[in-house]
Image (tube, rainbow, N blue to C red):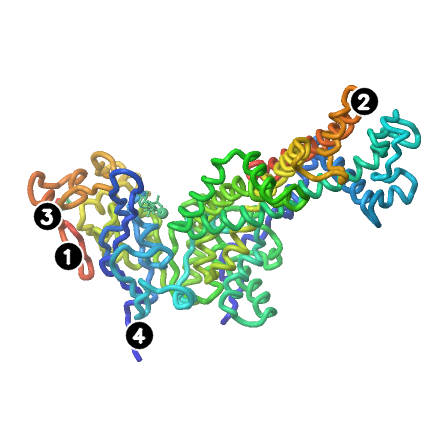
Amino acid sequence: MATAIGLAGQVDWDVPEQTGLWKDAWVRFRRNRLAVAGLVVIVLMIVLALGARLPTAPGGLWRILHLTNEPFLQDVTNSYATPSLQHPLGTDILGRDQLSRILYGASISLTIGIVVQFLILGIGGSIGMAAGYFGGWIDNLLMRFTDIMYAFPDLLLVLVFVAAFGPSFWSIFIALGLVYWVGLARLVRGQVLSIKEKEYVEAAIMTGTSPLKLIVKHLVPNSLGPVIVTLTFGIPAAIFTEAALSFLGIGIRPPEPSWGVMIEDGYAGIFADPRQVIFPGIAVALTMLSFTFVGDGLRDALDPRMRR
Amino acid sequence: MTADPILLRVAGAFKHFPISGFGGGAVRAVDGVDLEIRRGETLGLVGESGCGKSTLARLITALLPATAGKIVFDGQDITRLKGWRLRRVRRKMQMIFQDPFASLDPRMTVGDILQEPLDNFAIGSMRDRRRRVQELLRLVGLNPNFTNRYPHEFSGGQRQRIGIARALAVNPSFIVCDEAVSALDVSIQAQIINLLQDLQKEFQLTYLFIAHDLAVVRHLSDRIAVMYLGKVVETAGRNDIYERPQHPYTKALLSSIPVPDPAVERERAPISLKGEIPSPVNPPSGCRFHPRCPIARVPGICSEQEPPLEPHGARDQVAACHFAGQA
Ligand SMILES: Nc1ncnc2c1ncn2[C@@H]1O[C@H](COP(=O)(O)OP(=O)(O)OP(=O)(O)O)[C@@H](O)[C@H]1O
Ligand code: SF4
Ligand SMILES: [Mg+2]
């Protein structure tokens, strides 16, 4: 085929300076101070949690470096110790070091909070995608099922599931995933329905794009922004639910110290030593707040309407 | 083998969008359209907003299934095609979309957008494809080095050029331009129309060029079809439509185009149409133009009998009006 240079008549040669979409979002995210502060706290929290588990738990790197004690080491002669150089946050009723337990607990709470989001993404994302993409009776069936799941109170559903399968890390994990996918499924379905109407999807079909490629290359990338935001807000929700369940005594089993377990333990002796509740409580609150700020920042940064 | 001079034939095409909810009914967006497009020509399709032009374009390109009727492209009935058989047709038939801001995926670079059709049809090696992308950009008057840019970095006119390049990627013989210039500034409209004309000469393209007024299609089209409320009401050669329109609706559309000559402009009495376009859910009985028609005989034949599309006026001219050419 002949290439005709200048065939186009007037040549439209210049475009403004280059900015990728994600780069653009990052610039906007950075302008939000609270979101950046939240991100810093989260990263710090993750580093501390990793250090408490690696290279080998319990206590991990921090213990090896003599920065903390062993989270499971009991010393009943030293219960409810006030903060000191050796136990910066004091000890609990069994004389276990609170700081090392909070750091170890961070690894459990964060893992639950973050990893559950992948389960939610897997279930909610694929159900929402299928409903939105196929429409018709598939959409009807999936969405009625979603409505039914939605009609149950969240905590009740988790309680039933954990009661049935016994309290453990895995049953909490799966129960949270099974409860929280509903919101994401609805979101993804809505996203896909609106993206499906966009001319660029028709254009892709017109140029011979197969259904699978259409989903992977157009529908998924274009619905990613709100999904990421929702999952980010889901992390504090999951952390809180885990803490609540553990507090009710049906969550993670002691001696594994999730923050919820620590608050429950400490609650028994709250009058003897309120620090037992205050420190893990602060950890939960700080983490939830940080993820919420980051979620807010992401929502604004990824919203295409906010683009200059 | 002598090629059929007719490249695309639309026969009795209907598209009804059912209205969900209580009461039912349907939006009769396309309501019985017959149309032929000849090899190498540009057929202009005009009509007011909402008359079903885009829906007809989507039937022709098989983006929507027809409720009834038949679309024959290049001798092949494509009405019920699916999967790879349909995709194969799309190597020869492409579309340029109305909204240059909605028709490019905002998450893909221009290079990826233009390479997608080449990938889909496995055209050439990877290196050939990249070279072809640059060639396409050059062809539509864009800098071939901008393959890493995102659509939002371009102006409306530049984006429409990208849309044109995408349509050209697979070397089609037929392109549907659905209001390809309506969203652009007037000065840029002219550039894009010139580009489309140059490309047509270079690659022997056949166009269906959709617009909502007769002014835009005038110097681009060989023949013009006028659509009203889901039906084609008149088709004729370009000059015949402008010089001796047969359908009162065509006359009304023509009279609303401003004339450059001020003397003529002063003399001119635009025919103003009564009322609004009726809803396509309940089109008027008989001739669906009768509530707004300045020469309608109501009550009478106009509100009772639907006028068929019949030869009137010049050779090759058809109009659907009981009183075609009168007044
Ligand atoms: N998917 C759909 N579902 C229901 N109704 C639709 C759908 N698409 C179009 N319609 C209706 O069909 C009619 C024709 O729409 P269409 O988009 O074809 O008009 P158009 O001539 O292209 O108008 P415009 O000049 O505004 O682009 C309109 O009344 C519109 O509301
Ligand atoms: S058939 Fe009657 S109402 Fe319809 S356009 Fe002709 S004159 Fe007007
Ligand atoms: Mg349209």
Q: Amino acid at mark 4?
A: Ala
* Chain containing mark 3: B
- Where A256 falls versus A34 (above or below)? below
Foreground pick, B303 / B157: B303
Tell me the CA gap for discs 1 and 3: 14 Å
Alpha-carbon span between mark 3 and mark 2: 93 Å
Image point 83% across, 37% down: which residue?
Answer: A100
Question: Which residue bears the numbered disc 1?
Answer: B310
Query: Is residue A61 in view from this perspective?
Result: yes
Q: Residues within 10 Å of mark 2 (few under 14, many from 20)?
A: some
- Asked if marks 2 and 4 fall on the same chain, the answer is no
Q: Are marks 1 and 3 on the same chain?
A: yes
Q: Which residue is mark 2?
A: A273
Q: State the residue position of label 3.
A: B305
Q: Earlier in the sequence, mark 4 or mark 3?
A: 4
* Left or right placement of residue A171 versus residue A92 in this view: left
Q: Is tag 1's residue or tag 3's residue first in the polypeptide sequence?
A: 3
Q: Amino acid at mark 1?
A: Glu
Label 4 belongs to which residue? B3
The residue at 60%/57% (across/down) is B147
Q: Quadrant of residue B4?
A: bottom left
